[in-house]
Image (spheres, rainbow, N blue to C red):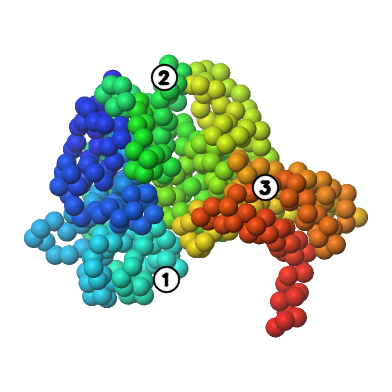
């Protein structure tokens, strides 16, 4: 077994014992006295704690923003953590991103500024001359309550006026950092601490299968965008913790002849290209899953595995007929995603069994598909409800197949079977849609909470079916032209 090893700015770090619940933000501020990263929300929502984490993927080094407040130190083995302090070590000049923020008056109180700078820094390294839209997307996970965003966007457009990306240390010295990180990957499983403070980082999927079968009460952690809040908001112990987010086999993306298969540890960011290529109808939904920090850390496998009734990916994947592969030791079994969710907090997953991959069949020619997310604010918000619709209308204009699934409407992600039955065999017309709407009340008895009332949820679900009909028939576009 090996200790936990990573690089913090330019320093090699080796840890032999640490609490499973120790967040990166607390480690930076309290242990290392690096206080540029701030705690605003402690739930991955405001972005004041944003740092960069560089990881090797297929021999390439990619830096991405994450929320340090919900990232555990035990998740950092083999990574390079970059904080705001590393951009301009004293007494050097300001970094180009920092200088742009100064010159364009992008900061007032300054509390959120370090996180904004780090988000712009990550964008600048990938896109030296970003558009306003690219800047807005990069800042989805950063909330500023002082300046408004116009001067920040102006600063983002001007970053390359103050320096070249090629001269940045993370770019200029990338090969050296790749070698340093490669040396940390010795193929050994990390296993440190004991009891509730035990942290395990399996080196391979086989190691994970063996360890989890032996320790089925451990908490599996991938991106920690959900588990992180168990600690910061509910003060729960999660140890022993098994971090699975950096196992190479779980990062596979395979576009097969009839389906797309994603390893359980594939993040939303990693999956985006393949998902929007094969399922372009999910582009808008994908770009509204959290902000960049959440999309960089959160994984599709974990979004399914935790069984949340408001997860963004289960409704569309259920409608598409996806199945998951569950593994325990050397045994595997496949479960249709619609059958995986049993009740609130209960899934068809045995002790010691984990989600290894998810397989999504391609949409057959001639079928219509769409997914809609309803939230209180457009960006970086949890769904009040999320609905996915898939239908096939035959040459006679009759509905030959209907698959409708919702999140946020029940204790689990769930098919709207009564609505589907009300559509099957009927003409794909407005009259059929209106006649099917009462069936929603048979499928769902939603709750009232801080995100929406039960009445709103039910009415919104009905209106989404109306919207889907209008979009698939072109009636909405014709109506817009008529009004114009």
Q: Which residue is pictured at 28% across the width and 72% down the height? A: 106
Position of 452 with respect to 69 (left or right) is right
Quadrant for the N terminus, please: top left
The part of the image, by quadrant, that contains residue 338 is: top right
Quickly name the residue at label 3: 445
The part of the image, by quadrant, that contains residue 136 is: bottom left
Q: Secondary structure at mark 2?
A: loop
> Mark 2 and mark 1: span between their CA atoms?
48 Å
- The residue sitting at the left extreme is 91
Instruction: Kindly indicate whether the residue at mark 2 contacts the one at mark 3 (C-beta within 8 angstroms).
Output: no
Residue 104: percent from left, percent from top: 27, 76
**57, above or below 103, in the image:** above
**27, above or below 155, in the image:** above
Q: Is residue 96 visible?
A: no
Q: Secondary structure at mark 1?
A: helix
> Mark 3 and mark 2: span between their CA atoms?
38 Å
Residue 464: percent from left, percent from top: 68, 59
Quickly name the residue at label 1: 132
């Amino acid at each position: 077994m090996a200790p936990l090893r990573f690089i913090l700015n330019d320093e090699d770090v080796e840890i032999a014992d640490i609490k499973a619940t120790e967040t990166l933000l607390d480690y930076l501020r309290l242990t290392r006295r690096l206080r540029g990263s701030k705690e605003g929300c402690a739930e991955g929502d405001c972005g004041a704690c944003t740092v960069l984490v560089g990881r090797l993927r297929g021999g390439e080094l990619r830096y991405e923003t994450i929320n340090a407040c919900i990232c555990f130190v035990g998740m950092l083995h083999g990574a390079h953590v970059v904080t705001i302090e590393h951009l301009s070590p004293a007494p050097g000049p300001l970094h180009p991103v920092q200088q742009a923020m100064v010159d364009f008056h992008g900061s007032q109180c300054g509390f959120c500024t370090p996180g904004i700078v780090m988000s712009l820094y990550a964008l600048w390294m990938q896109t030296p001359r970003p558009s306003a839209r690219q800047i807005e997307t990069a800042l989805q996970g950063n909330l500023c309550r002082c300046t408004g965003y116009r001067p920040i966007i102006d600063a983002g457009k001007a970053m390359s006026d103050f320096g070249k990306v090629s001269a940045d240390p993370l770019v200029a010295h990338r090969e050296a950092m790749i070698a340093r990180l490669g040396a940390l990957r010795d193929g050994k499983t990390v296993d440190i601490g004991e009891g509730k403070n035990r942290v395990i980082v399996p080196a391979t999927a086989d190691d994970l299968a063996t360890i989890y079968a032996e320790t089925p009460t451990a908490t599996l952690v991938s991106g920690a965008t959900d588990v992180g809040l168990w600690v910061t908001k509910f003060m729960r112990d999660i140890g022993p913790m098994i971090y699975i987010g950096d196992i190479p086999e779980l990062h596979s993306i395979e576009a097969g002849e009839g389906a797309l298969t994603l390893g359980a540890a594939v993040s939303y960011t990693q999956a985006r290209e393949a998902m929007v290529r094969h399922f372009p109808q999910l582009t808008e939904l994908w770009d509204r899953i959290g902000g960049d920090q959440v999309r960089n850390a959160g994984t599709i496998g974990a979004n399914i595995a935790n069984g949340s009734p408001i997860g963004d990916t289960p409704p569309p994947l259920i409608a598409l007929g996806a199945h998951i592969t569950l593994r325990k030791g050397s045994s595997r079994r496949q479960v249709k995603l619609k059958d995986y969710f049993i009740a609130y907090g209960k899934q068809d997953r045995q002790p010691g069994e984990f989600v290894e991959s998810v397989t999504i069949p391609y949409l057959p020619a001639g079928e219509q598909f769409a997914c809609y997310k309803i939230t209180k604010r457009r960006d970086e918000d949890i769904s009040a409800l999320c609905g996915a619709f898939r239908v096939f209308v035959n040459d006679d204009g009759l509905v030959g197949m209907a698959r409708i699934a919702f999140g946020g409407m029940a204790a689990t992600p769930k098919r709207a079977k009564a609505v589907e039955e009300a559509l099957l065999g009927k003409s794909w017309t407005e009259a059929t849609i209106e006649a099917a709407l009462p069936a929603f009340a048979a499928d769902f008895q939603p709750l009232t909470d801080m995100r929406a009332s039960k009445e709103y949820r039910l009415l919104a679900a009905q209106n989404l079916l109306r919207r889907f009909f209008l979009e698939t028939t072109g009636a909405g576009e014709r109506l817009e032209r008529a009004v114009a």
